[in-house]
Image (cartoon, rainbow, N blue to C red):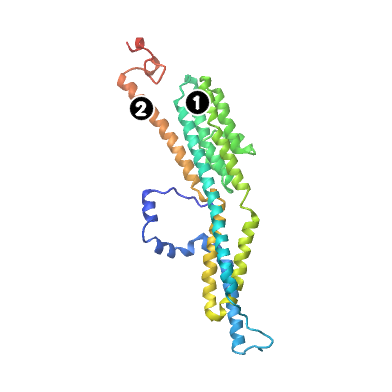
Amino acid sequence: MRKRRPLYTPDDWREHRSSLRHLRHLLSSLSSRVILSLIPPVSALTAVAAALALYNSAVAFAWLPPGLFPLLHASSLPYQLTAPALALLLVFRTEASYSRFEEGRKAWMRVMAGASELAGIVMSVKGREDDAGVKRSLLNYIIAFPMALKCHVISGSDIKEDLQNLLDVDDLTVLMKSKHRPRCVIEFISQSIQILHIEEPKRNLLESKLCCFHEGIGVCEQLMGIPIPLSYTRLTSRFLVLWHLTLPVILWDDCKWIVVPATFISAASLFCIEEVGVLIEEPFPMLALDELCKQLHNSIEDATAIENSVHERLLAKLKIHPDEHSINGWPNSKKEQG
């Protein structure tokens, strides 16, 4: 679950929709974590089917006393009646899990968009010269928030390793002592905004953008703390197990020893569907959060570099020293232009 997931590139999309994907997916079945996780239950159910087939064969060939050991078989009518219920249960279970996955993805996209927008406003703010260090720290705090939130919602993440090259040692020490690290980063951002020498409307605008961070924390914690109702998950699991435990009895009259591969195929198929629903119920390990945080970091660093390069280029064109101008090196009035 903690495998780093990549963001798709054009080459990945071409491979994803290639007609050879079916063969590739089939050949990689033994490396699929979904399939590997189902080896114990599928193997156990297949073994039960094999044991029942052996027992019925022994009774049929009179290897066991017929009076003491009855043949285990039954009508398929109960299965015909309950099959639609099992199908609907699996569909609803998977759909509910995908809804949680989609809600988590949208919540994370709002956090990333809010961080990018907040960073853009900070870069556009022109305060005093002594605000440069505060602005640089503020941008680092904005980059750090998604990383802190990622470590908050994914067990096993190392926040110290993720942020050691981004935050100062003292800031990182304060953060590590905090019980709720994403909110600690928000506090760093909020107090840094208060320190900036900017107009009050601009300060209020910056603080208003922190709402998406608080909302993101709330949605993520809700998704991580409140699963799909456990009675629903337990019912699906019990239904699947009982279904496949009795399947060889139902199929014996028609299939004989074929009940063994039939049970294997049915268990592997239906349990895989249920397993996918369980996996995507916890959305954040399924998302490429490491790559999204890295992408945000690179985009803000690139935007800062472009802003400085463009500023220097324009000043070089005008052959004017930046100290003579108060706004991006441009004259403030016609008098200054003269």
Q: Nearer the viewer, residue 100 or 38?
A: 100
The vertical placement of 190 against 58, above or below, is: above
At mark 2, the secondary structure is: helix
Q: Is residue 67 toward the left or the right of residue 210 in the image?
A: right
Q: Examine the image and state in which quarter residue 56 appears.
A: bottom right
Q: Is residue 44 visible?
A: no
Q: Can you give x and y, in whole percent of width and height, for residue 170 in the image?
A: 58, 32
Residue at the spot of label 2: 310
The vertical placement of 75 against 115, above or below, is: below
Amino acid type shown at disc 1: Gly
At mark 1, the secondary structure is: helix
Q: Is residue 167 visible?
A: yes
Residue at the spot of label 1: 133
Q: Is residue 11 toward the left or the right of residue 167 in the image?
A: left
Q: Nearer the viewer, residue 97 or 31?
A: 97
Q: Which of label 1 and label 2 is nearer to you?
A: 2
Please give the name of the residue rendered at 50% of the width and 48% of the height, measured from the top-left corner. 287
Q: Nearer the viewer, residue 250 or 311?
A: 250
Q: Is residue 121 toward the left or the right of residue 267 in the image?
A: left
Label annotation for residue 89? none
Q: Residue furthest right?
A: 68
Point out the image quarter for the C terminus. top left
Q: Examine the image and state in which quarter residue 334 appears.
A: top left
Q: CA distance from mark 1 to mark 2?
A: 20 Å
Q: Can you give x and y, in whole percent of width and height, for residue 204 in the image?
A: 54, 24
Amino acid type shown at disc 2: Val
Please give the name of the residue rendered at 32% of the width and 22% of the height, measured from the top-left corner. 316
The vertical placement of 261 against 272, above or below, is: below
